[in-house]
Image (spheres, rainbow, N blue to C red):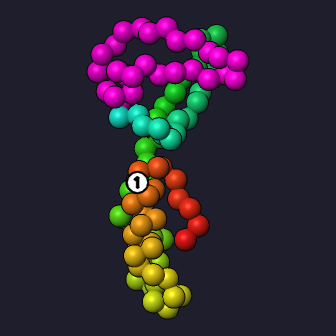
């Protein structure tokens, strides 16, 4: 990881832009989440929140196993999982 300072500006809404090279290096995509920490007399620290792995999620696995009992189409469940991987959020199934 390259360690060098970059200056970014805050807009009227409080938003900043993370430079493209840093986003690419850290695997930051649209919709990525961050923990934001306020460091007294220093500034902010952003910590990237890793996306959960839905393949090993017990609730998703249980839904898949019992989908026939609750009349849930497994294809729709797979579509929702794949959409989450792209967009970073789940919708109602």
Q: Where is residue 35 in the image (x, y as percent from the top left)?
A: 55, 35
Magenta stretch holds residue 23: yes
Looking at the image, the residue that sits furthest to the bottom is 69
Mark 1, residue position? 85
Q: Is mark 1 on a helix, strand or loop?
A: helix
Q: Position of residue 30 (x, y in %)?
A: 47, 38
Q: Position of residue 53 (x, y in %)?
A: 38, 56
Q: Is residue 58 in sight in this rendering?
A: no
Indicate the quadrant where residue 9 lies: top right
Q: What residue appears at the point 53 percent right and 35 percent down from the top-left corner?
A: 34
Would you call the spot at circle 1 few (<14 residues within 10 Å), some (14-19), or many (20 or more)? some
Q: What residue appears at the point 58 percent right and 67 percent down from the top-left corner?
A: 92
Q: How many labels does the image show?
A: 1
Q: Give the range drawn in magenta.
A: 1-26
Q: What residue appears at the point 39 percent right and 60 percent down from the top-left corner?
A: 82
Magenta stretch holds residue 80: no
Q: Out of 75 and 34, give the one closest to the viewer.
A: 75
Reply above or below: 81 against 2.
Answer: below
Q: Is residue 28 left or right of residue 37?
A: left
Indicate the quadrant where residue 10 lies: top right
Reply above or below: 63 against 21.
Answer: below
Q: Is residue 49 in sight in this rendering?
A: yes
Q: Where is residue 45 in the image (x, y as percent from the top left)?
A: 53, 23
Instruction: Quarter of the image for the C terminus: give it.
Output: bottom right
Q: What residue appears at the point 30 percent right and 16 percent down from the top-left corner?
A: 2
Reply above or below: 51 against 8.
Answer: below
Reply above or below: 78 against 39.
Answer: below
């Amino acid at each position: 990881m390259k360690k060098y300072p970059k200056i970014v500006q805050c807009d009227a809404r409080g938003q900043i832009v993370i430079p493209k090279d840093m986003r690419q290096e850290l695997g930051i995509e649209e919709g990525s989440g961050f923990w934001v920490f306020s460091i007294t007399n220093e500034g902010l620290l952003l910590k990237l929140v890793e996306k959960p792995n839905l393949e090993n999620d017990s609730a998703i696995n249980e839904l898949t196993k019992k989908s026939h009992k609750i009349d849930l189409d497994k294809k729709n469940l797979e579509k929702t999982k794949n959409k989450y991987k792209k967009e970073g959020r789940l919708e109602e199934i």
